[in-house]
Amino acid sequence: MKQLQAELHMAMLMITHDLGIVANMADEVVVMYHGRVMEAGSLDDIFRDPRHPYLRALMRAVPRFNMAPGERLTPIREARASTEHLISGAARPHVAHAHDGPLLTVRGLTKRFTTRRTSWFGAKPGGEVLAVDDVSLEVRRGECLGLVGESGCGKTTTAKMIMRAMRPDAGEIVFNEQGVPRDVLALEGDDLFAYRRKVQFVFQDPFSSLNPRMTAYDIISEPLVIHRIGDADERFARVKELMGLVGLDIRFLRRYPHSFSGGQRQRIGIARALALSPELLLCDEPVSALDVSVQAQVLNLLLDLQDALSLTYILISHNLAVVNYLADRIAVMCAGRIVEVASYDELFRNPVHPYTRALFAAVPDPDLDRKLDFAALMEGKASNPAAWPQPFCLDGSVKLPLLDVGDGHLVRASADADVSELRA
Ligand SMILES: Nc1ncnc2c1ncn2[C@@H]1O[C@H](COP(=O)(O)OP(=O)(O)O)[C@@H](O)[C@H]1O
Ligand SMILES: [Mg+2]
């Protein structure tokens, strides 16, 4: 758009709630709130010296890269969650044991989709998509593992296979059940039913993932009904507790999804996922469908719940700043493969893989001192493994190992690459 604007000498009016985009695109900014112009001025004036409380609040609510360790986002409207009473209650915190090993181990997971093209002459076999290619991961008990990568790189497919909602073509998934390794792909019957209690999913789109014909009460209590937990009174008490936990007013119990805002709906989805006291929560783009002004609420809620309930998360997102805010370790995925894994501060300080670097460079940060570097985006070739320079280039069917460049920082590169040079 910038290029077009320059070529055609045109003016542009850009309407967005994303301050990162504003910081990178605009010359002048007008801030609207409740139908009125609240503040207007040059980009510098607005970002370096925001005056209106709404704008200031908005700036504190967006995850940024330059956040101090432990700094919390300040939601525009705080949703008060009641987690205090939980430690003693029915929530059963999952106590970690030092000798326990990882909670979930994924090895060599692979999934191929065949797409059919329909033409006038009927269905023809089309191309094959290698959606997930030899993915290996370890998730430690109590941590939040971030899984990042652009849309279409295989994140959701990976999560679906871990959840046993989709069969992989190859690979292994091992769930650590109090020290006993369970082969997830071999689970059947009662064992599979029991696994479903331990691993739950928070969906990306709170508008389509909740059944419009069910009340909030029905939605949150359904897992309890399916798993035959408690009688009607106990379920009612549990739903009330869950609603308090995610900061929803229990007077809304009988309302239908359409009467809730996006943020409230996502909190219903989270309450439902927590109903069975799971150990592992797979959060697939939990805030990407939400307005930035409510993202902070949901992110803080996930942060507090993890702490209060000793949960383990896999957090899937295409937004590195979001992952940065919650994750202890980050796995970067591109074209079905994991290309880099590191703790979040190591990844932020020393990104090694060209794709990771491009991903960092591609996030519009609401910080005038960290403007988008269009050159670092490799002219859109960053997500093409064949265009990566040596020793990362993946041309054709070349398989490269994940090398440890120090302290568990893994990078997919040629086995003969100089490890010390990569990290420098
Ligand atoms: N059911 C399916 N049938 C065919 N192709 C699929 C199916 N699900 C996903 N894909 C393809 O697999 C790739 C990975 O998809 P997905 O896991 O949804 O990516 P992400 O969650 O990272 O955006 C994409 O190319 C997508 O088009
Ligand atoms: Mg997805």
Image: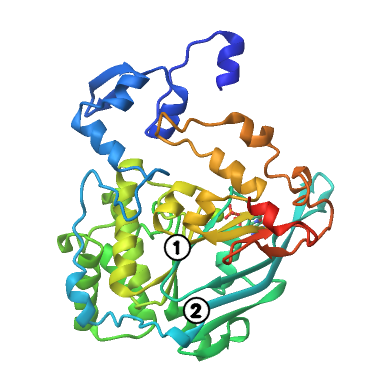
Q: Nearer the viewer, residue 21 or 372?
A: 372
Q: Are marks 1 and 2 in contact (CB under 8 Å)?
A: no
- Asked whether mark 1 lies closer than 8 Å to ligand 1, one says no
Q: Residues within 10 Å of mark 2 (few under 14, many from 20)?
A: many
Q: Earlier in the sequence, mark 1 or mark 2?
A: 2
Q: Nearer the viewer, residue 173 or 356?
A: 356
In percent of width and height, residue 159 lies at: 55, 65
Q: Residue at x 43, y 18 (%)?
A: 13
Q: Residues within 10 Å of mark 1 (few under 14, many from 20)?
A: some
Q: CA distance from mark 1 to mark 2?
A: 15 Å
In percent of width and height, residue 203 lies at: 44, 59
In percent of width and height, residue 65 lies at: 42, 44
- Asked whether mark 2 lies closer than 8 Å to ligand 1, one says no
Lateral position of residue 246 relative to residue 181, left or right: left
Q: Identify the residue position indicated by label 1 in the image.
A: 328
Q: Secondary structure at mark 2?
A: loop
Q: Identify the residue position indicated by label 2 in the image.
A: 103
Amino acid marked by disc 1: Asp
